[in-house]
Amino acid sequence: MQSNFVVTSYAAPVAPKPIEQSTAEVADVLRQILELQREQVAYLKQAAAAQDNLARWRALIGRWRDEYPDLPQGCKEAMPILEKAFGSLVSQLVEELQDQGPDALDSEFALQDFLDRYGMRLGQMGNILNLVGPLAEAGSQNEQS
């Protein structure tokens, strides 16, 4: 049994010749990179602040702390009551739709009657929850800080 071996000589790769630049040019490029990084950091800080949805509510609580000292605690106490009322309203809506069956909202009259009974109240309760909830949460975060 014979094997053929191919042997080649090894040639070390040649490093590219460095480009000769003056120290002033290198310093200028580094300054530009530093300035760009500073701009990126400023942008990221602004983006992070924009993502903080509770900042507005914390600011409101902070500004009016002397005028309304019990507002955050009151909101926390009101949330379960509001949530229960909202859940009850949704439960009534679901029960009525289940009782009436799949054709419950087929006619224009039935749809309008349904919206008159539930639409406005459900929308308003949702809006109230969306306002009181963040105030309660922001108040909790202010207490923890």
Image (spheres, rainbow, N blue to C red):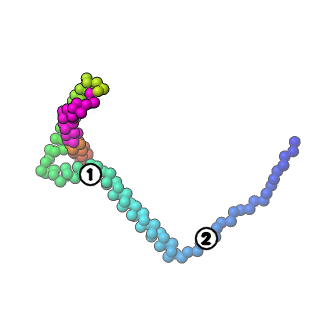
Label 2 Cα crowd, 10 Å radius (few <14 / some 14-19 / many 20+)? few
Tell me which amino acid carries mark 1: Ala
Q: Is residue 85 left or right of residue 27?
A: left
Calculate the distance from the C-alpha at mark 1 to the C-alpha at mark 2.
Answer: 52 Å
Above or below for 54 versus 91: below
Magenta residues, as a range? 104-129
Residue identifier under label 1: 55
Front-lying residue, 39 or 96: 96
Tell me which amino acid carries mark 2: Pro
Residue at left offset 30%, top offset 50%: 52
Q: Is residue 38 left or right of residue 7?
A: left
Front-lying residue, 141 or 80: 80
Residue 2 in the image: state x and y as whole percent: 87, 45
Secondary structure under the numbered disc 1 in the rendered image: helix
Front-lying residue, 99 or 42: 99
Residue 121 in the magenta stretch? The answer is yes
Q: Residue furthest top?
A: 99
Label 1 Cα crowd, 10 Å radius (few <14 / some 14-19 / many 20+)? some
Residue identifier under label 2: 18
Front-lying residue, 27 or 48: 48
Q: Quadrant of the N terminus?
A: top right
Residue 114 shows in this picture: no
Residue 7 in the image: state x and y as whole percent: 80, 55
Residue 128 in the image: state x and y as whole percent: 20, 41
Camera-side mark, 1 or 2 = 1
Above or below for 14 versus 137: below
Q: Is residue 141 left or right of residue 38?
A: left
Circle nearer the N terminus (1, 2): 2
Look at the magenta stretch and give its main secondary structure: helix
Residue 53 shows in this picture: yes
Residue at left offset 46%, top offset 66%: 33
